Amino acid sequence: MSRELPTAATRFCQQLGIRYPVIGGAMYPCSNPELTAAVSAAGGIGILQPISLTYVHGHDYRAGIRLMRKLTDKPIGMNALIEKSSRKYQQRMEEWVDIALEEGIRFFVTSLGKPDWVAQRVHAAGGLVYHDVTELKWARIGLDNGADGLICVNNRAGGHAGSRSMSELYQELHELAVPLVCAGGVGAASDLWQALDRGYVACQLGTRFIASDECRASDAYKQAVVTAEAADIVLSERVTGVPVSVINTDFIKRSGTRMGWFARWMLGGNTTKHWMRMYYGLKSIWQLKHSSLDETGARDYWQAGKSVAGIERIESCDAIMQKLISSEG
């Protein structure tokens, strides 16, 4: 590195046993095991996404973790989606967390619910839990339920973005006196160092690692990430029922970004809301899986964040990491 890391970032790296304060964010459907392992091997920490690992990329869950262990001996993490959509889903996620702990994973990123049961299991094994948040009220719920730190998802993130800027979110959360990770808008070295200088202990990157050699996303998807500018990222309600950051492709332009009146009515009812969420969930899982792997580019339904502005080419994870930490850009 051309300059020393801030003290808080150094402490974070030491705590996780990694070299650089970079988290390879868990992505559905783009987190294949080779990508997760490559981020860790490059000096950051890759986060496995269990539904991507099993449903999209076809691995038995435990075997997928062991494949990553063959590819690198560096720490990897796990993303636990803890929304209680059904008892069967929760049981599966509990099994996945337990297997991850059995396989030596000690860093967990939780989202979409209260992380209490994850924290209990992980803390008993000596691990850490960081919780995804977009504002103060969710941060307090996460910390009250055992989170050790916060992944602060800002308005430049891909997928389910927040509403606040990187600086606004830091200003809102820093008095909680826990480690804060910047998530969103980091695609180049200048973005990384800006966040670290602001006081974040690390940055979580997703979009930047889509445009990598190790990611199994289609070349069409990767090239779209490289050529897109920040203005090409729009929020669509038609993916999951809540706004999601996507590239404004021909498909998005044709289908629109607003949900229809019937879907909005269904989501507004106490009884019908559950069924509409389930419909959107199944629909998005299928659509995003097939669009991300389709080499023809015909299914151009691609999630990405505004960090596309700083992404110029497809490179190996190691090359990406070295450029991120080598200078202030």
Image (tube, rainbow, N blue to C red):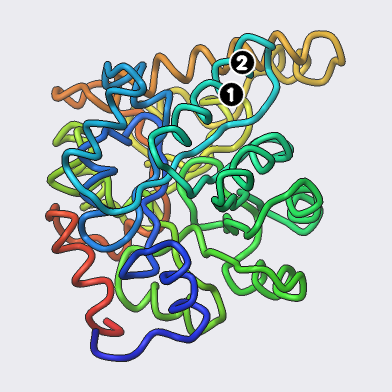
Q: Which amino acid, mark 1?
A: Glu
Q: Quadrant of residue 299?
A: top left
Instruction: Tell me if 260 is positioned left or right of 100 in this view.
Output: right
Q: Determine the residue positioned at 32% across, 56% down.
A: 308
Is residue 293 placed above or below 31 in the rendered structure? above
Q: Residues within 10 Å of mark 2 (few under 14, many from 20)?
A: few
Is residue 262 placed above or below 136 in the rendered structure? above
**Numbered disc total:** 2
Q: Determine the residue positioned at 71% across, 12% down.
A: 262
Q: Which mark is residue 94?
A: 1
Is residue 12 placed above or below 102 in the rendered structure? below
Q: Are marks 1 and 2 in contact (CB under 8 Å)?
A: yes
Q: Secondary structure at mark 2?
A: helix
Label 2, on which residue? 91
Q: Determine the residue positioned at 42% across, 48% down.
A: 233
Instruction: Tell me if 287 is positioned left or right of 157 in this view.
Output: left
Where's residue 118, x and y in %? 64, 37
Check the picture and name the quadrant holding the C terminus. bottom left
Q: Nearer the viewer, residue 132 or 157?
A: 132
Q: Secondary structure at mark 1?
A: helix
Where's residue 62, x and y in %? 34, 23
Check the picture and name the quadrant holding the N terminus. bottom left
Where's residue 59, x and y in %? 28, 19
Q: Residues within 10 Å of mark 1 (few under 14, many from 20)?
A: some
Q: Quadrant of residue 273?
A: top right
Is residue 40 placed above or below 95 in the rendered structure? below
The span from disc 1 to disc 2 (Cα, nearest Å) is 5 Å
Instruction: Tell me if 168 is positioned left or right of 159 in this view.
Output: right
Q: Which amino acid, mark 2?
A: Gln
Q: Determine the residue positioned at 14% across, 22% down.
A: 296
Where's residue 15, x and y in %? 47, 67
